Amino acid sequence: MAREARALPNRDASERAAPAIQFVIRNSQSAVLQLSGLEPLKITPEFGFAVIGERTNITGSPKFSKMILSENFEGALAIARQQVQGGANLLDVNMDEGMIDSEAAMTRFLNLLGSEPDITRIPIVIDSSKWSVIEAGLKCVQGKPVVNSISLKNGEEEFLRQARLIRRYGAAVIVMAFDERGQADNLQRKTDICARAYKLLTEQADFGASDIIFDPNVLTIATGLEEHHNYAVDFIQATRWIKANLPGTRVSGGVSNISFSFRGNNTVREAMHAAFLYHAIQAGLDMGIVNAGQLAVYEGERQSAHQRGSMARRACGGASETRSGERHRRLHRYRHRGSAAKMQAPSRCDRRPAYGRHERGRRSFWIGQNVSAASGQERAGDEESGGVSDAVHGSRENGRHQAARPHRHGHRQRRCA
C-alpha cells in the first residue's frame, strides 16, 4: 500500500493553493453587507458613507408625525420620496406613537411604500423600540431590510430570541449599546457591551458578522452638564475600537442626537452634524441616520466654508482631543442667547449637501464617499467640468471653482470657495 501511495502523482501548486483561495473568497464576501429593496445594495469597505433617511420617523419629524396622525399617508409617502431623491441609500421608518396603533400604521405604510418603486428601490430600516412593531414590519417588507434595533436591556435570553427571529426573516440588525444596567454613556461601557453582543450573535445566534451593525449611542452634548462633555469623542473612539476589534461589522448612529440641545437653531445644528460626521467617518462610521440632502459642507482645511461652524468644531473636534469645560460652557451660553444672530448666515455656496448626490457633465457621484480608486482620466474629466472634483478629492489648486457676486452694499465682491 505504501508503494502504491508513493507512486501516485503529486498535487500541483494550484490544487494546494485552492483552500487558501477559497478562504480569501469567503473572507471577502463576509466583508460585504448585502441589503435590498427592489434593487440590491452592497455596502463594502470601499462604499463610503451610507445615508439613512431620517424624516420618515414619527418621533423625530413633526411634519411626518402630523401626516400620520391625520392619516394623510399620501403626504407621508411624499416625504419618503423626498428622502430618496435627496440621496438616501436606506430609509428609516418609525411609527412609535402612543396615540396610534403602531403595528397597524407600520404595516399600512410599508404596504403603501411597496407600491412606489421609486421609493422602495432602496432598503428599508424598520425602526421601533417595540418588538411587536418590528415583527409587523418584517412580515410585509420586501427585499432584505435592517432592524433598528435590539439590545441586551432585557437580558441575553430575550436578545438571542429576537436575533434568531430576525435571522429567520432574512434581515440585518442594528444592536444598540444598551444592557441590563442601562445605556452605555462612556467608552468602556460601549466597547464592553458591543463585544458581548458580538460574541452572542456570532457564536449562539449563528449571525454573520457582515449582518451586524453596532450603534454605540450618539448622545447630546453642550447640555451644560460636565458629564456630557465627552459624549461625541467617546462615540468616535468607540467606532474606531469596533472597526479594529469586531471584524466584519458595521457602525451606525443617529447623528441628529448630537445637537438636541440646540433644537430650533438649525444653523448651529447643521454645522455640528457636519463637523461630527467629518471626524466619525474618518474613525470608521459606515452609515448614519440623517436628513438626506441637507448636510452642510465640512472640509477641514477651508476656513471660509466653516464660518457658521466654528462652534461645532469646538464641540466635536478631533477624536484625540479632550473637550474642555470652557468650550461647552461657551456652547451652552450661545444656546440660551440665540446664536443665529451672531453667526453668519450660510451663503448659497455653502448650502450644497456634503453627502448627497451631485451631478455635473452627465456624471454622478457621492460627496463624502471614498473615491480614492478613481482613475486619473476621471479626475481630469471632473476638472474640465468645472472643478467638481475639488469637493470630492479635496484638491486645493486643481478644479476649484469660485462664485462671485456683488456685496449687498454694492461696492464689494464676495467669493465663495
Image (cartoon, rainbow, N blue to C red):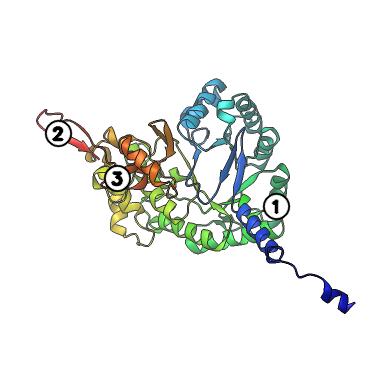
Q: What amino acid is at disc 3? A: Gly
> Which residue lies under the disc numbered 1?
158
> Which residue lies under the disc numbered 3?
309
Q: Which residue appears at 87% of the width and 75% of the height? A: 4
Number of residues whose C-alpha sits closer than 10 Å to that of mark 2, classed few (under 14), some (14–19) or many (20 or more): few
Q: Is residue 261 visible?
A: no
Quadrant location of residue 304? top left
Q: What amino acid is at disc 2? A: Gln
Q: Which residue appears at 49% of the width and 33% of the height? A: 55
Q: Is residue 89 visible?
A: yes
User: Dot 3: what SS?
Assistant: helix
Q: Earlier in the sequence, mark 3 or mark 1?
A: 1
Using residue 350 as the reference point, say whether residue 2 is left or right of it. right
Quadrant location of residue 108? top right
Give the foreground label among 3 and 2. Answer: 2
Q: Earlier in the sequence, mark 3 or mark 2?
A: 3
Q: What amino acid is at disc 1? A: Glu
Mark 2 and 1 residues: CB-CB less than 8 Å, in contact?
A: no
Q: Position of residue 54 (x, y in %)?
A: 49, 37
Q: Which mark is residue 413?
A: 2
Q: Which residue appears at 39% of the width and 53% of the height? A: 279
Q: Position of residue 60 (x, y in %)?
A: 48, 36
Using residue 284 as the reference point, say whether residue 400 is left or right of it. left
Q: Position of residue 223 (x, y in %)?
A: 37, 50
